[in-house]
C-alpha cells in the first residue's frame, strides 16, 4: 500500500481549524459569513476544487446544535474514499472487471484534496483464488492514499481466508482516526454447509458466489467476533463517534440474497449506547441507506456489476437509484467518498460513473427523511 | 396411435422425465428437433391438395400449381368444401356450438346453457367437453407429466442462467451475476421499443445481447434449445405478473 502521508485535504483542514479557532462566540449568522470567507480564501489558493464538499455542506446542512456543541468544540472533519466489490477474475480470463477496478483507482487518485484513507469494501476477488487477490492487491497498490482493507465472502470461501489474511492481515481490526473510532468487521462468516455435503473448496466457493444459491448459510459476525467487538469498545466513551465497516449490511434486508446479517440485532445492541454510529457496508452493489435507532447505514457501489433491488425488505428511507442501462458497462457502478463531519455524523457521496453524483446526507437519515431528501429516480425497478 | 399405445408411451415418458430431473443434464448447443408436420398426399390431377388442420381431411384443387395462389372466391369455396367433408365424416360432432360460444365470449355476454335438443344430440363425453376433442381424452396423470416436462425445461434454463460457459460465455460472467432469481429481466414488458437496439425488441433479443456483450459469447440461434430453456426459466420467475408489453 502507498505510504501514509499528510494529504492536501488534511493540511487544508488544519489551516481551517486554525482560522476558525476563537470564533466560537460568534452567532450563527456571523459564523456562516466567516465560514464563507474562509472557503473563498482557500479556493483562491486552489486548494479546493469549486463545488467541493466540506465547508458548504457543514454550514448549510448541520443543525445549530452541531455547529455549537460539537462542530467547533470537537474533532476535525475528514474525508475518506472507497472502492468496493471489484470481483476480479484472473487477468487472462476477464479484462472487463480489471478495467473497472483500475478506473476506480484512477478516480480516487484524481481527488484533490486526497482523502485521508481509502476503504476497500470487500469482494476483491470473484472466486477467492490467490491469483485474483494478488491482481487486486497490485491494482489497489496504485492508490496514493493509504488503504484500509475489508474482506468479502468472495475473498474468503475458497480457502477460508488463508490467502487474504496472508496478504492483508486479520480481517477484523480497529483504529482511531481524528477522534473517531473505526471498527472493521468480518461479517460474512457462514455456518458449515460444506462438510456434510462433501464439497470441494471450489464447490464451496461457487455456492457462496451465487447470490441466489440457497444452499449456503446466512452471513453472521458470529459469537467470537461479537465478543471481540464488545471488548474493543469497552474503552471507547459513548460520546465518541463510531465508524463501522462491514461487508454485509448489519441489518436484515433480503434473506434469499444474503443482503442480511443473521446476528444483526445483537451487533446493533453492542453499538446502541453510542451517540453517533455510521455503518458502511459493501455487498449490495446499489445505492442503499437506512437508519435504525442511533445507527446510520450506507451501502457502497460496486465496480463490477450492479445488483437489482430485492423484491422485498428495501429500507423505507432508501430512494432507489435510477434503473441501470444494460448497454453501458459502467452505468450504476462507481466509487465514492464519505465526509465525516465535525459532529461525527457522516455524509455519503455516491460517485456514479456516467451519471451525476448523488450526496446522501446524514441529516436525511437522522431526521428520518424529514430534511435533505436525495433526488428521486426517473425509472425505479420493475 | 391407439389409446393403449398412448398410455404405454406416457408411462415410458414419465420414467424418462424423473430420470432427467434426478440427473439434471446440462443443455449443450443443440437444435430443437423439427416440429411434427401433416403428411399431405400428392394430387392425382397435378393440382394441389389442401388439408384441414386435423391433418386428415383434404380437398384437391385442380390446376393449382405449387407456388400459385387462389382467387379469394375460390379459396372460400375450398374452405366450404373442406368443412362440408369434415361434417359428413363426423355426423355427431357439434362444431357450430364451439363457434357460437366463441362469438358469445367476444361479445362478453354470459354463456347460454346448451339447449335440451343440442344436449341430446351431443354424444356423452368425458370431462364436460363438447367435441370429443384432443384434450378431452387426457387424464390427471397426463397433466402431471406435462408439468414435469415443463418444470424440467425450466430447471435446465435455471442451470444455464447460472453457467456462463454453457452459453458460450468466455469471461466467467453468468446471467445470475446481475439478475439473481432472474430479477430485473422483466420479460412481461416485451415486446417494446429498445432505443439502444433501434428496434422493437423481444426478450430473446435482450438475452442475446447479454450473451454477446457481458458474457462475451455468440448470439444463440432462435431454434437453439438453450435459448428456449433460458426464456422458459425467465418467464417462469414472473408467473402471475401481468403482461404489460411496451412498458418502459
Ligand atoms: Fe460483491
Image: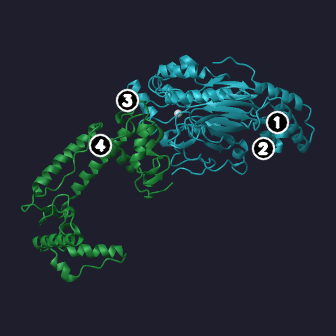
Chain colours: A cyan, B green
How far is mark 1 from mark 3, CA to CA?
Answer: 55 Å
How far is mark 2 from mark 3, CA to CA?
Answer: 54 Å
The answer to whether marks 4 and 2 mark residues whose Cβ atoms lie closer than 8 Å is no
- Dot in front, 4 or 2: 4
Q: Which residue lies under the disc numbered 1? A: A71
- Determine which of the numbered discs, if any, sits on residue A61 in the image: 2
How far is mark 2 from mark 1, CA to CA?
Answer: 12 Å
- The reply to whether label 2 and label 3 mark residues of one chain is yes
How far is mark 3 from mark 4, CA to CA?
Answer: 35 Å
Point out the tag, 2 or 1, that comes first from the N-terminus: 2
Left or right of B70, for residue A321: right
Q: Residue at x 79, y 40 (%)?
A: A56
Determine which quarter of the picture holds residue A4. top right
In the image, residue B211 sits, relative to residue B50, either above or below, namely above
Chain of the residue under label 1: A
- Give neighbour class at mark 2: few <14, some 14-19, many 20+ (Cα, 10 Å): some
- Determine which of the numbered discs, if any, sits on residue B94 in the image: none
Q: Which residue lies under the disc numbered 4? A: B225
- The reply to whether label 2 and label 1 mark residues of one chain is yes
In the image, residue A93 sits, relative to residue B107, either above or below, namely above
Q: Position of residue B195 (x, y in %)?
A: 50, 49
- Dot in front, 2 or 1: 2
Left or right of A98, for residue A14: right
Amino acid at each position: 500500500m502507498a505510504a501514509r502521508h499528510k494529504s492536501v485535504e488534511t493540511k487544508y483542514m488544519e489551516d481551517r481549524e486554525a482560522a476558525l479557532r476563537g470564533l466560537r462566540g460568534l452567532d450563527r449568522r456571523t459564523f456562516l459569513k466567516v465560514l464563507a470567507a474562509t472557503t473563498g480564501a482557500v479556493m483562491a489558493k486552489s486548494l479546493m476544487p469549486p463545488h467541493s464538499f466540506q465547508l458548504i455542506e457543514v454550514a448549510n446542512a448541520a443543525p445549530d446544535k452541531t455547529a455549537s456543541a460539537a462542530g467547533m468544540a470537537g474533532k476535525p472533519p475528514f474525508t475518506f474514499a472507497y472502492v468496493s466489490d471489484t470481483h476480479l477474475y484472473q487477468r487472462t480470463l476477464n479484462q472487463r472487471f480489471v478495467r473497472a477496478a483500475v478506473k476506480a483507482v484512477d478516480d480516487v487518485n484524481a481527488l484533490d484534496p486526497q482523502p485521508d484513507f481509502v476503504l476497500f469494501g470487500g469482494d476483491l476477488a470473484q472466486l477467492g483464488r490467490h491469483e485474483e487477490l494478488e491482481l487486486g492487491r497490485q491494482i489497489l497498490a496504485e492508490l496514493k492514499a493509504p488503504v484500509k482493507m475489508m474482506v468479502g465472502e468472495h475473498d474468503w470461501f475458497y480457502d477460508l481466508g488463508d490467502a487474504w489474511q496472508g496478504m492483508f492481515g486479520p480481517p477484523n481490526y480497529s483504529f482511531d482516526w481524528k477522534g473517531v473510532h473505526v471498527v472493521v468487521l468480518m461479517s460474512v462468516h457462514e455456518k458449515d454447509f460444506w462438510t456434510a455435503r462433501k464439497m470441494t473448496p471450489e464447490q464451496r466457493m461457487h455456492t457462496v458466489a451465487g447470490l441466489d444459491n440457497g444452499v449456503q448459510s446466512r452471513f453472521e459476525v458470529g459469537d467470537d467476533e461479537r465478543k471481540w467487538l464488545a471488548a474493543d469498545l469497552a474503552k471507547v466513551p459513548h460520546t465518541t463517534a463510531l465508524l463501522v465497516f462491514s461487508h454485509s449490511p448489519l441489518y436484515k434486508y433480503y434473506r434469499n440474497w444474503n443482503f442480511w446479517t443473521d446476528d444483526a440485532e445483537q451487533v446493533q445492541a453492542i453499538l446502541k449506547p453510542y451517540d453517533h454510529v455510521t455503518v458502511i457496508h459493501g455487498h449490495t452493489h446499489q445505492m442503499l441507506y437506512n437508519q435504525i435507532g442511533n445507527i446510520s447505514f450506507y451501502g457502497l457501489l460496486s465496480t463490477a456489476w450492479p445488483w437489482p433491488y430485492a423484491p422485498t425488505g428495501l429500507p423505507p428511507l432508501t430512494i432507489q437509484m435510477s434503473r441501470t442501462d444494460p448497454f453501458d458497462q459502467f452505468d450504476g457502478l462507481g466509487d465514492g467518498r464519505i465526509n465525516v463531519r465535525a459532529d461525527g455524523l457522516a455524509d455519503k457521496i455516491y460517485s456514479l460513473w456516467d451519471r451525476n453524483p448523488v450526496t446522501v446526507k446524514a441529516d436525511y437519515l437522522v431526521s428520518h427523511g424529514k430534511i435533505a431528501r436525495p433526488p428521486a429516480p426517473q425509472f425505479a425497478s420493475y | 396411435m391407439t389409446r393403449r399405445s398412448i398410455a404405454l408411451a406416457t408411462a415410458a415418458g414419465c420414467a424418462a422425465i424423473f430420470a432427467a430431473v434426478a440427473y439434471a443434464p446440462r443443455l449443450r448447443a443443440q437444435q430443437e428437433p423439427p416440429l411434427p408436420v401433416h403428411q399431405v398426399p400428392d394430387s392425382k390431377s397435378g393440382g394441389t391438395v389442401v388439408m384441414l388442420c386435423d391433418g386428415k381431411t383434404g380437398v384437391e384443387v385442380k390446376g393449382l400449381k405449387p407456388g400459385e395462389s387462389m382467387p379469394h372466391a375460390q379459396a372460400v369455396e375450398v374452405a366450404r368444401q373442406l368443412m362440408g367433408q369434415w361434417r359428413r365424416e363426423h355426423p355427431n360432432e357439434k362444431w357450430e356450438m364451439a363457434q357460437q360460444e366463441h362469438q358469445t365470449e367476444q361479445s362478453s355476454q354470459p354463456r347460454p346453457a346448451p339447449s335440451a335438443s343440442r344436449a341430446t344430440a351431443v354424444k356423452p363425453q368425458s370431462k364436460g367437453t363438447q367435441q370429443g376433442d384432443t384434450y378431452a381424452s387426457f387424464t390427471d396423470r397426463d397433466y402431471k407429466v406435462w408439468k414435469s416436462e415443463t418444470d424440467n425445461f425450466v430447471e435446465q434454463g435455471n442451470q444455464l442462467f447460472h453457467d456462463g460457459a454453457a452459453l458460450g460465455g468466455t469471461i466467467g460472467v453468468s446471467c445470475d451475476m446481475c439478475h439473481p432469481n432472474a430479477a430485473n429481466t422483466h420479460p412481461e414488458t416485451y415486446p417494446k421499443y429498445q432505443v439502444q437496439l433501434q428496434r422493437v425488441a423481444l426478450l430473446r433479443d435482450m438475452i442475446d445481447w447479454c450473451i454477446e456483450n457481458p458474457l462475451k459469447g455468440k448470439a444463440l440461434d432462435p431454434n437453439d434449445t438453450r435459448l428456449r430453456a433460458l426464456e422458459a426459466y425467465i418467464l417462469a420467475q414472473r408467473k402471475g405478473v401481468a403482461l404489460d408489453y411496451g412498458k418502459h
